[in-house]
Image (spheres, rainbow, N blue to C red):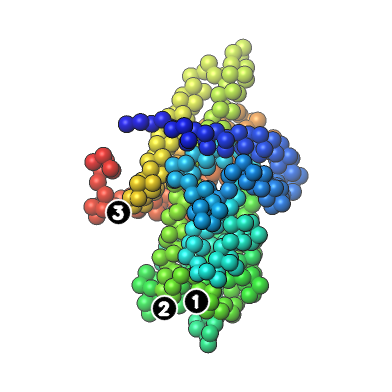
Amino acid sequence: MDFSLDDEQRAIRDTARAFIRKEVVPLEHELLRRERAGQPGIERSELRELQLKARKFGFWGLATPTEHGGMDLPAIMQSLIWTEIGHTLVPFRFGGEADNILFYANAAQQDEYLKPTIEGDRVSCFAITEPGAGSDAANIKLSARSDGGDWILNGEKTFITNGNDADFAIVVAVTDKDKGVRGGGTTAFLVDRAMGWRSEFIATMGPGGPASLVFDDVRVPSRNILGEIGQGFELGMKWIGKGRYLIPSHALGIGERALQMAVDYANTRVTFGKPIGENQAIQWMIADAETELEAARWLVLRAAWTVDQGQDPRHSSSMAKLYGAGMINRLVDRVMQIHGGMGYTRELPIERWYRQVRLLRIYEGTDEMQRLIISRDLLRGYTKIGGHLA
């Protein structure tokens, strides 16, 4: 069993690491200063400039197929790069990406929506969650009724990432109530903001914020159906499942950076005549953090490996997200404790991480939903204890 990276993997990872350290991390001081002043930490134009700069290094479209100008990297490589991105608190991501289900678009839709999104000229959001349908995605109510050659959408979506910035939304709506959500009764639509929906900002404890999207008799032409009529819930599940191993991959990077800060502080902060790192209480917090970080790393890489093997990744991705989200919350809490009062201030990134990582236990599948998936797979015999080694 070989746990090492090959030369190509190491070269790609190290190039991404160098870019993040040289071009992105230096922006953190200004980001924190702006946020303390009540201003946006970083503007979209600044993030766009970073993406275009990264494109010159060859980093464009990590998951995007090569025929669309992307790198089409294996899942393990994507995971390694997302860990590097996690080393900075700047909300940066490499450009050239689009929602995975946008690749189901027909030729005309690709020209209007997919290609401009990959190039960064358009901004999308995915809208399935509703006030009464979060973890229970099959309970969506937003309706779409046929009217001649169009569809009329009515209802509300909520907690939509990018909902305030998007100029179009991928909306899953009920088109046949009698068939039910899981029985082919939903359809995905490409809905331009100009068609009439509006967004309302939702303030949260973390940086940025999602939005509620309100649809009041929004008319959408039939040509804007994504995929097939009745395929909406299926596409929605493909969208949700795509990123589950990438979320804890990002958490690994946060954990590595935060733990290194704790180690450095423990070696330099002196109390009662000695560095606090000589105290057993601090040593145990560091040891527990490192152990959990490594455990999460191998769960994440196993999930990515499962994707690359063409196997069903749902079970392994659920374990990676469940453990990775819990791990990073515990780790950042320990790092804050080691830093004491200074860690609680907004001078350092620690308190920002503390608020940011709490979301990881909620979005794209709560802890409770991951536990449901994992236990159900075992109880119903979908998988065996021991996974692929069983």
Is residue 340 depicted above or below 23 in this figure? above
Q: Are marks 2 and 1 in contact (CB under 8 Å)?
A: yes
Q: CA distance from mark 3 to mark 2?
A: 27 Å
**What residue do we see at 56% from left, 63% from top?**
114
Q: Quadrant of residue 138?
A: bottom left
Is residue 221 depicted above or below 79 in this figure? below
Is residue 230 depicted above or below 47 in this figure? below
Q: Is residue 224 visible?
A: yes
Which residue does the numbered mark 2 point to in the structure image? 177
Q: Quadrant of residue 136?
A: bottom left
Within 10 Å of disc 2 (Cα), the crowding (few <14, some 14-19, many 20+) is some
From the top left corner, tell me how far across and down residue 75 is, in percent. 44, 45
Give 186 or 212, whichever is nearer the viewer.
186
Q: Quadrant of the C terminus?
A: top left
Residue type beneath disc 1: Ser
From the top left corner, tell me how far across and down residue 115 is, in percent. 58, 61
Q: Is residue 258 visible?
A: no
